[in-house]
């Protein structure tokens, strides 16, 4: 999966229930689901360029 497409940027999504965190890339086709509780995850933070994780 390439992250070099123009306009794509990484965002951190988190599960409000169990605090599971994942990094996904915009634009999202759909919101990711938590792998732990299978609930809907929410966007926690938009990661900017130059920020390592
Ligand atoms: Zn969860």
Image: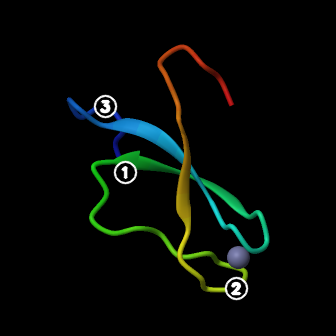
- Packing grade of label 3 (10 A; few <14, some 14-19, many >=20) is few
| The quarter of the displayed image where residue 19 is located | bottom right
The Cα–Cα distance between marks 1 and 2, rounded to whole angstroms, is 25 Å
Label 2 Cα crowd, 10 Å radius (few <14 / some 14-19 / many 20+): few
- Pointers 2 and 3 in contact (CB under 8 A)? no
Q: Is residue 24 above or below residue 41?
A: above
Q: Residue at x 62, y 75 (%)?
A: 34
Residue under circle 3?
4
* Residue at 65% from the left image edge and 78% from the top image edge: 35
Of the numbered discs in the image, which one, if any, rests on residue 1? 1
Left or right: 19 in relation to 47: right
Tell me if mark 1 has few (under 14), some (14-19) or many (20+) residues whose alpha carbon lies within 10 angstroms of its own: few
On the image, the x and y values in percent for residue 32 come to 47, 69
Label total for image: 3
Residue 16 percent across, percent down from the top left: 69, 67
Q: Which mark is residue 37?
A: 2
In the image, is 26 to the left or to the right of 21? Answer: left
Alpha carbons under labels 2 and 3: distance apart: 31 Å
Q: Position of residue 48 (x, y in %)?
A: 49, 22
Dot 1: element: loop
The answer as to whether callout 2 falls within 8 Å of ligand 1 is: yes
Report the front residue among 2 and 10.
10
Q: Quadrant of residue 13?
A: bottom right
């Amino acid at each position: 999966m390439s992250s070099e497409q123009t306009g794509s940027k990484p965002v951190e999504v988190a599960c409000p229930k169990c605090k599971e965190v994942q990094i996904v890339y915009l634009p999202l086709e759909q919101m990711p689901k938590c792998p732990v509780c299978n609930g809907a995850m929410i966007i926690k933070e938009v990661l900017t360029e130059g920020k390592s994780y």
